[in-house]
Image: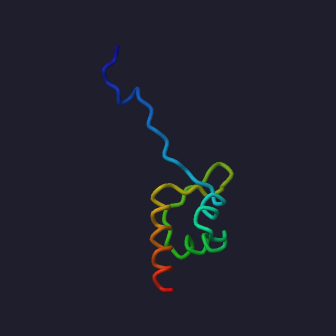
Amino acid sequence: MNKNKTAATKTKAKPKYKTQDICRLFDISKATLFRWEREGLISNVSRDWRNWRLYDDKNLQEIKTIMRARNAKR
């Protein structure tokens, strides 16, 4: 039995969220989400084999920060 588990164990996949999931979660439009990405407020958004955007937990934190700043201005 091989005791070297690093090669044998699978890494747990991080949750990925589709654009529609993010828009529903934060009640924002796709245009707003894509603009924030274009402006550099959301970084390193990955893409799937169809070239659809996939957001991870780091992106969710960035969006939460944007939303807090946006709500603080009101």
Q: Residue at x 35, y 30 (%)?
A: 6
Q: Does 72 appear above or below 5?
A: below
Residue 2: quadrant of the picture: top left
- Please state if 70 lies on the left or on the right of 2 as rendered: right
Q: State the image coordinates of residue 54 (x, y, percent, origin top left).
A: 58, 55
Q: Residue at x 41, y 29 (%)?
A: 9
Which residue is nearer to you in this view: 70 or 8?
Answer: 70
Quadrant housing the N terminus: top left
Q: State the image coordinates of residue 55 (x, y, percent, origin top left).
A: 55, 57
Q: Residue furthest bottom?
A: 74
Which residue is nearer to you in this view: 20 or 7?
Answer: 20
Residue 3: quadrant of the picture: top left
Q: State the image coordinates of residue 25 (x, y, percent, origin top left).
A: 59, 62
Residue 45: quadrant of the picture: bottom right
Q: Residue furthest left?
A: 3
Q: Does 27 appear above or below 58?
A: below
Q: Residue at x 60, y 70 (%)?
A: 33
- Please state if 11 lies on the left or on the right of 26 as rendered: left
Q: Residue at x 45, y 59 (%)?
A: 58
- Please state if 11 lies on the left or on the right of 51 as rendered: left
